[in-house]
Image (cartoon, rainbow, N blue to C red):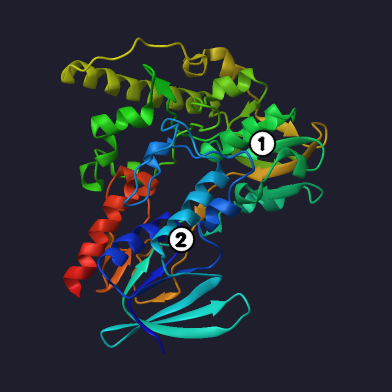
Amino acid sequence: MAHFDVVVIGGGQAGLGIGYYLRAAGRKFVIFERGRVGETWRTQRWDSFAVNTPNWANCLPGEVYDGAEPDGFYHRDELVDYFEDYVAKLALPVFEGVTVTGVDVIGGGFRVTCEDADGVVDTVTATNIVVASGMMQAPKISRMRERFPESLLELHASDYRSPETLPPGAVVVVGAGQSGCQISVDLINAGREVYLCTSKVGRLRRRYRQRDVVDWGEDMGFWNVSVGELPDPAIEFAVQPQVSGVGRFGSTLSLQSMARDGVHLMGRLSDVEDGVLKTDDSLAEHIAFADERSAEFIRMIEDWISSSGVSAEPIEDDPNDLPAGPEVAESGITELDLEAAGVGSVIWCTGFTAEFDWIHAGVTDENGRPIHKRGISSVPGIYFLGFPWLHSRKSGIIHGIDEDARFVAEAIAART
């Protein structure tokens, strides 16, 4: 039975990030990935998908972006290529097609049970475990799906690839987070009729004063805000804001801009009865909430410019960021006869869930969430990495992996 100082579970940005520091420390370690390197980016993103953060913010530990478009946005395939090149350059010990099915405490360490693509089961032991599998392990879909007519194709956002892969007809999109809005735009640009069941989600203007909002956030220390500094603990569980990386400089997404382009806006899905989709009347609230979050961030930028004394470019026009008038919500609908509207498919953009019951060590709370402090779990020797708000606002994006991975690697060194 092979023994390692560290077993890393997950070969995405978090697993590769900790691999960099474990390699630098001379650790004997292995990275197990159930699919291929960057599997969720490969299989849970659609064909036109672009990363939502600019290229300069998507570097793994030890790397600095040196390409021609630091303010551009990687296409899905470009990011996967970058991950593969990173593994090859560092000679990271990644084993693909290996699913970890169990982690058990034995003595002062752990036994890790694995199964490969051929169903062969094996075990290794480790002094430390780093869970870098992320929170996007399984699609989360409402039981409401059972109320839709069986004739419709229903799929989760992670299974959507392009408008051409859907049956003919209109499309109902449920959920107005990043995926829901971006997929709606993808569909409407292809000439599809789209009905979007909205939800209460903030949004960000893509560029302001000739700079990306991620750049402004970096200067203002916005991304470094820690969990303990949040004015409202509920922010930790908020949906990621509406924004898109599609286009040379990405683009601003707003419910009103999508309505202008032809998307039919609805409130939050409440029922499907006899082939009629029904929503509540919360559309106006959803639009107002998103507009206020965008305006709030712009005020933060202006306050920072004023207090820091930095120079800034003039404010440019962005039609997609203009606050919505009352007519946008008034034009929304709350009932949709699916057959009469010619709906052929439903896409659930309702997020993901993660289960950690394969870790037999009591590392989760009553809601199934990992118990940890900055990635250090309540069980000595088990660590978490790559989770939203692991430590700060940037923990959930590639930009935050370096800092979090370095901290976890130092904690492993201190324990060992």
Q: Which residue is pictured at 24% across the width and 38% down the height?
A: 231
Residue 88: mark? 2
Horizontal side of 269 relative to 335 (left or right) equals left
Q: What whole-number distance in Å separates the C-alpha atoms at marks 2 and 1? A: 51 Å
Residue behind mark 1: 278
| 355 or 55, nearer to the observer | 55
- Quadrant where the C terminus lies? bottom left
Numbered disc in front, either 2 or 1: 2
| 252 or 77, nearer to the observer | 77
Neighbours of disc 1 within 10 Å: few (<14), some (14-19), many (20+)? many
Above or below, 34 against 305 in this view is below
Instruction: Specify whether residue 345 is in view.
Output: yes
Q: Circle 1 sits in a helix, a strand or a loop, which is it?
A: strand
- Residue 126 location, quadrant: bottom left
Q: Which residue is pictured at 21% across the width and 65% down the height?
A: 411
What amino acid type should be assigned to the residue bearing mark 2?
A: Ala
Horizontal side of 262 relative to 151 (left or right) equals left
Q: Earlier in the sequence, mark 2 or mark 1?
A: 2
What amino acid type should be assigned to the residue bearing mark 1?
A: Lys
Neighbours of disc 2 within 10 Å: few (<14), some (14-19), many (20+)? few
The x, y position of residue 49, in whole percent, is 58, 40
The x, y position of residue 125, in whole percent, is 37, 84
The x, y position of residue 75, in whole percent, is 55, 40
Above or below, 83 against 194 in this view is below
